[in-house]
Image (cartoon, rainbow, N blue to C red):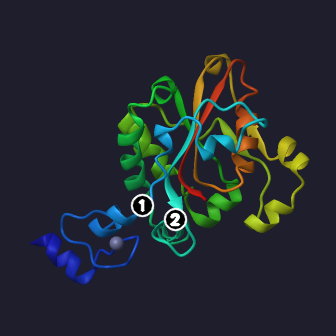
Amino acid sequence: MFQSLINLFFPRVCSGCNSILLTDEIVICTTCRYEIPLTNFHNNPNNEAISKFYGKVPIEFAAALLSFQKKGIVQEMIHKLKYKGHEEIGTTIGYWYAEELKDVAQIKTIDCIIPVPLHRRKLRERGYNQVTTFGKALSESLNIPFNDSILVRNVYSKTQTKKSLLKRSELNTAVFDVHFDESLTGKHFLLIDDFITTGSTLEVCSRALLKIPDAKVSIVCMAMTQ
Ligand SMILES: [Zn+2]
């Protein structure tokens, strides 16, 4: 009854299509859940996500749950998560993906989940890192620690466009720092982000993490542009 009253005054809407959610629907409606395009990358070790990194940086496993298409359900969801404060979308995608990933052999060897960091200033402006709730849901479901203090972003970039203007060489040396001690030697890190486009940010983050002796890196994102 109380929940129905809340819904009456603050209607919960689907993050994919904005239709009113039924009582037992959480974050996305049943229709969107069936229509949302999935990559199924986790069932294919040589998928399009990992092929982004071939010849650039050694990655153990890479995958993304959703297929990102312009003006589609996924774009709507990621936009609300990133710019409208709807952090519960990350939680939902995290629990969903954990169910798919839990039987993947490489995932079973992960020691720590690490988000692609925002710069301190960006974090202040936005108020949250859009991948934190995704990472924490994966962490809880897969029983793997989440750590957002190992990898740090040094350079503030106002927009994606501006960032792409930075030369690759600059990205490689200056943008990310890794803070570690001997306890992280030989660990397998799961680097996470909202989506994979060119893969260049993930590549640079992976390089930073691979400064840790004998470290291994895998990558999991919510979505991938195809
Ligand atoms: Zn919907």
Figure quadrant of residue 35: bottom left
For the residues labelled 1 and 2, say whether their Cβ atoms are less than 8 Å apart: yes
Q: Which residue is mark 1?
A: 89
- Outermost residue toward the bottom in this view: 9
Question: Disc 1 and disc 2: Cα gap in Å?
Answer: 8 Å
Residue at x 38% of width, y 38% of height: 140
Q: Given the image, on which type of amino acid does mark 1 rest?
A: Ile
Q: Given the image, on which type of amino acid does mark 2 rest?
A: Ile
Which quadrant does the N terminus fall into? bottom left
Residue 126 visible within the image: yes
Decide if ligand 1 comes within 8 Å of the CB at mark 2.
no
Height in image: 172 above or below 158?
Answer: above
SS class, disc 2: helix
Residue at x 61% of width, y 59% of height: 226
Q: Which residue is mark 2?
A: 78
- Which residue is nearer to you in this view: 12 or 69? 69
Q: x, y (%) of residue 170?
A: 89, 48
Height in image: 207 above or below 195?
Answer: above
Height in image: 72 above or below 124?
Answer: below
Q: x, y (%) of residue 120?
A: 68, 54
In the drawing, does residue 163 fall left or right of residue 132? right
Height in image: 59 above or below 122?
Answer: above
